[in-house]
Amino acid sequence: MSLAYRSDIDGLRAIAVGSVVLFHARIPPFTGGYIGVDVFFVISGFLITSILHQEMTAGTYSLVDFYDRRIRRIFPALFLMMAATTLFAALILMPRQMQGYVGTLVPSALFFANIHFESLLNYFGPAADEVPLLHLWSLAVEEQFYIFFPLVLFVLMKLGGRKLAVGGLALIALASLAYAESIVETEQSAAFFLLQSRAWELLAGSLLAMVTLPRLPEKAASWLGIAGALAIVVPVFAYGKETVFPGLWALPPVLGAVAIILSGGFAPNGIVARVLSLKGMVYVGRISYALYLWHWPMLVLIAIWKGRHTTYIESGIVILVAGIISALSLKYVEAPLRRGSALGGRRLMRIGAGACAILLTVGVALALQKAGRGVFPISPLGAAAEAAADDRSQFQRTCNNNARFWTPDQMQPIATCALGPGAAKGSYDMLVWGDSHAGATFLGIAEMAEKLGLTARLQTMAGCPPLVGGIARQDHNNGAVCASYVAAVMDEIRRIKPKVVVLVGRWSIWTTRSSAGFSLISSEIPGGMTRDRATSKQVFAHMMERTVAELRQIGPQVIVLGQSPEYKPAPAGCVATREFNGTGGAEGCMSQPRASALDMVGFGNDVITATAGRHPGVSAFRMADIFCRDDRCTAGEGTRFFYVDGDHLSVTGARHAAEDKALRQTLMQALAVGGATPATAND
């Protein structure tokens, strides 16, 4: 298709940015508004490929000119936003939060933010709505695409002209889509953030720009536009966090955008093209880039400042202000610097200015990283509370079996994930096995075992309960990796034959907090494949029963730890925030009624206790009894914080638990029966 100004494409940009902004503002009906990014990808692929193809056909193509245009289009608004966001972040964020923000500046400035965030936003990382520059992942995908795409297109055009180029791009697009679909349930984060699983969306627009199509009758083209609009609008309201996205579920919005662009080319007077060409729609489309840049950091920083998510009214005000800033950006920043005459019309000067913007941002990031905080100080108590978030043992940091592309041969080795004299020999007396709660609890138990001359080994995979007989199903995770890991651990137990196995887990996720997003399923019990809370509770009881029975058949004594109390908000984070803001009342962050805590962990405790009562050699210990006294549960004492977040114990908390006489006695008895002969516990 030929390239000329298309007001309907600007209107399509308005739909894309509006969907994303309303989704980010948490407006309930727009649960699938994230598909607006996919629409942007199609538009970008179409427009830029149209320009490149025309230049290559005319013999005027220049890679330097291409990157000059990209710098003029992208850099001015981007680096202005990053500078302003950094300033306000320094004023609003606590020292540790500021360090986290600074860590995102360099990836954002160098356009590998998507790769950075794919690794950052894991089980132990920050929440997505706490990262002011998170939205720059999509810009990074585009810029990475445009590093390779012009060269690939140029080579294909030189070798075989338009036909070879279309065929080659189509094969790459199909491979990218197939890859995205193949990993979206097991590696959803990679499928979402990385170029190789998103390239097909940009290529969909590229192929539309390259193919030669017979002219459609205007009426048929108009109906095609309506179908395309429905393919975008329906997902905006019908999709949600449970949608397995991207992959095949991204096809409707992508093909919808293709259909609208195609329709507008043949039926400029069709109803969709006319609606998209309305002045208001076109203007929003013109400021869409700046609006996309500004709205997210504003929403995030204001929410952090207020200590809660913004209300609908507050979000509306933020979006309005972001719109005003975007309008000013278009008029006074983007439009003047986008012209070929910018900076005296000197191409090298513009490229140099872009390089300087990157270098300056990197320099500021390094300086802020060295400073270690923002503008305002925090009290000693607040600093101790912030430090608690990093109070994780080396075992917890390095011994988690990462579910990403995990296979049994990637099992974390005994030598580096065990404490005691047997570690170097590849043997151990006690296994602490479970999800991330096992990693958080391990050090206290392992240090006690080491004092007795014994060796304790950690086996952990985040989000994977140490249970056989079912599947731990999560959003965008079908549980296959977890099941494979559990089977591998059982094989290791059969080989090593430890004296004691300690099972640790965040049982509440699969019981009282269970939902379709986190549920245990099993074909071994009637109705066990339904993904709901009631079924998950039943499957939990079944899996716990089967797990301890199989372990006892292998031989070790079994201890099942009941879950420690959960807190919301996280106690240390609550204290740090109140100290930083000077609002006081930090003591209110550190405790909760015992009844409230037991409401959350009580069901799991009851199942564990009942199961242990049916099996000789199996003990149940309620961790809540350590942290709860009388009618209150406490998350710390003074500047000692027992939790790193709302549910994981810190090293301080793990050691505090290991000092409990009842827990030590339970462990000692199991070790003695299991064959170890420690004389005394060395207190």
Image (cartoon, rainbow, N blue to C red):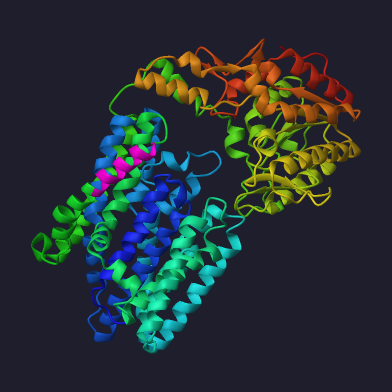
In the rendered view of the protein, which quadrant contains the N terminus? bottom left
Please tell me which residue lies in front, 523 or 401. Answer: 523
Residue 156, horizontal then vertical, whole percent: 39, 82
Is there any visible trace of residue 115 in the rendered image? yes
- The answer to whether residue 112 is visible is no
Residue 562 sits in quarter: top right
Q: Where residue 153 sits in the image (x, y, percent)?
A: 37, 78
Q: Does 92 sit above or below residue 168?
A: above
Q: Is residue 322 magenta?
A: yes
Instruction: List the single residue furthest toward the left.
Output: 344
Asked if residue 670 lies left or right of residue 44, the reply is right
Q: Main secondary structure of the magenta part?
A: helix
So how many labels did they put on this image? 0
Above or below, comparing residue 144 to residue 516 in the picture: below
Q: Quadrant of residue 506?
A: top right
Tell me what residue is drawn at x 38 percent, y 36 percent.
310
Of residues 451 and 673, the one nearer the viewer is: 673
Location of residue 615 in the rendering, given as x and y in whole percent from the top left corner: 90, 30
Q: Which residues are magenta?
A: 311-323
Residue for point 35% across, 71% down: 272
User: Which residue: 46% across, 43% down?
Assistant: 128
237 and 358: which is toward the camera: 237
Confirm whether the magenta stretch covers residue 213. no
Quadrant of the drawing holding the C terminus = top right
The picture places residue 673, in percent across and down from the top left corner, at: 89, 24
Above or below 277: residue 79: above
